[in-house]
Amino acid sequence: MAVGTHGESFMETDPPASHPARRGGRDAGGDAGGRDDAGRGAGGGGLDGLAHVANKIRDAVESVIEGKPSVVRLALTVLLAEGHLLIEDVPGVGKTMLAKALARSVDCSVRRVQFTPDLLPSDITGVSAYNQERREFEFKPGPVFANIVVGDEINRASPKTQSALLECMEERQVTVDGTTYALEPPFMVISTQNPVEMEGTYPLPEAQRDRFTARISMGYPDPAAELEMLETHGASSPLDRLTPVAHAADVRDLIEVVRAQHVAPAVRQYAIDLVSATRRHPELRLGASPRATLHLVRAARAYAALDDRDYVVPDDIQDLAGPVLAHRLLPTAEAQVERRRPEQVVADLVKRLPVPSPGR
Ligand SMILES: Nc1ncnc2c1ncn2[C@@H]1O[C@H](COP(=O)(O)OP(=O)(O)OP(=O)(O)O)[C@@H](O)[C@H]1O
Ligand SMILES: [Mg+2]
C-alpha cells in the first residue's frame, strides 16, 4: 500500500521502550534501519513476528481464494483488530469459502452456524438443561463459544435470532438464565449474507450491522483467477488441504502488538472528522456511530501492522473508510431514488476532506 509522502511524520517521536514493536527484534540495537530476526517466529516477536505469522495466514487463505488479495488482507485486518467481519455478495463468489479458509488456517476452536428462519436464539448461545442425576440445571454452551464463529447466511434468520448475537459480539459474553459466561479471546464472528434485496431474507438491523467492524464484498474473480480456480478445484477442494499455520495464542499475541500501534493525534482527528462528516451529510439519514470511529482506528492499527509499520498514516484510514463505515450508513429517500450508495458517499468524503499534514 502507498504510504503517504510524509508517512514518517506520523511516527512516535520518542517511542516508549515498552512498545511491543520494540520488544521484538525491531530496532534492538538502536539502529533505526536495522532489523533483528531473533524475535521472528510465532507471536511474541513484535511487529516482525506479526508480519511473519500474518503472512503465513494470508498465504494459507490465498491458497484457497483465488485473485482476491485485498479481500484477504481486509479479513486479516479485522481478525487482528479484534473485530467481526460481514461478507456480503451474490451467491457463489466464495464467501463461505473465505470464512472457512480463515477459520481453518488458525488452530483454534471454530463453529459454524447455518442461519435459517427457524433457528432459535438458544441454538446460538446455548441452553440450560436439567440434569436428572445431579438434580440441577447444567449449561450446554452453544456454537458461539468458539474462537471463530462462522455465521453463514445470517440474514436468513429471524431478527430475534440475529439479535442473540448482539450481546456476544459487543460484550464478548453470553447471558443465559441470568448467568453470564465470558467468551475466550480471540473471538471473531464472520458472517456471510447475500445482498439484502434477495428473497427470503431479513435485513440486519442497524444495531447489528454496527457491530461488524467491516463489510467486504468478494466481487467476481478475473478470468485468470477463475481459470486458476478451475485448476486448483479439480479433484478435491483446496480447503481440505489447508492445515492450520498459527495457534490461537499467536493470534492473541498479534492482537497485543496491534493494540500498541501508534496513532498520531492528527490521524485520530482525521478519523473523527471523517466519521462526523457522515453525520452531517445531506444524502444520509443515519451517519456513523462513535463505535464506528473506534472500529476505524482499531482496524487502521491492524492494517498498518500488516504493512510492517508501527504507526498509522492517513492512507490507512482512507483505505478502510469504505469497508468500515459504509455498511452502517443509511441513505435518505432522495439518495436512494438517485441510486447513490453509501460507499460512494464515503468515497466522496475521503476525496473532499483535508488530509492532515504532518505538522498539524
Ligand atoms: N475467488 C475464488 N477463488 C476460489 N474459489 C472460488 C472463488 N470464488 C468462488 N469460488 C468457489 O466457488 C464455490 C462456491 O463458493 P462459496 O460456497 O464460498 O460461495 P458463497 O459466496 O458462499 O455462495 P452462497 O451465497 O450461495 O452461499 C466454492 O467451491 C469456491 O471455492
Ligand atoms: Mg455460502
Image: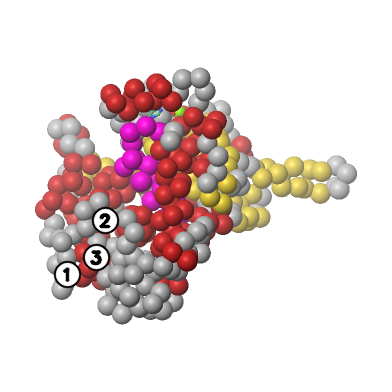
Q: Residue at x 49, y 45 (%)?
A: 189
x, y percent for residue 165: 51, 44
Label ID, residue 358? 1
Q: Are marks 3 and 2 in contact (CB under 8 Å)?
A: no
Residue that numbered label 2 is attached to = 316
Residue that appears at 58% across and 47% down: 108
State the CA–CA distance, disc 1 to disc 3.
Answer: 9 Å
The tally of labels here is 3
Tag in front: 3 or 2: 2
Say which amino acid is labelled 2: Asp
In the visual, does 300 lie left or right of 251?
Answer: left
Q: Answer whether residue 287 is visible to the viewer in this image.
A: no
Q: Position of residue 71 (x, y in %)?
A: 34, 40
Between 74 and 48, which is closer to the camera in this rendering? 48
Q: Residues within 10 Å of mark 2 (few under 14, many from 20)?
A: many
Instruction: Indicate the secondary structure of the residue bearing disc 1.
Output: loop
Relative depth, front residue between 139 and 314: 314
11 on left or right of 89: left
| Disc with the residue nearer the chain's start (3 vs 2) | 3
In the rendered view, tell whether residue 249 sits above or below residue 29.
above
* Magenta stretch in the rendered image: 65-86
- According to the picture, the residue beneath numbered tag 3 turns out to be 267
Quarter that holds the C terminus: bottom left
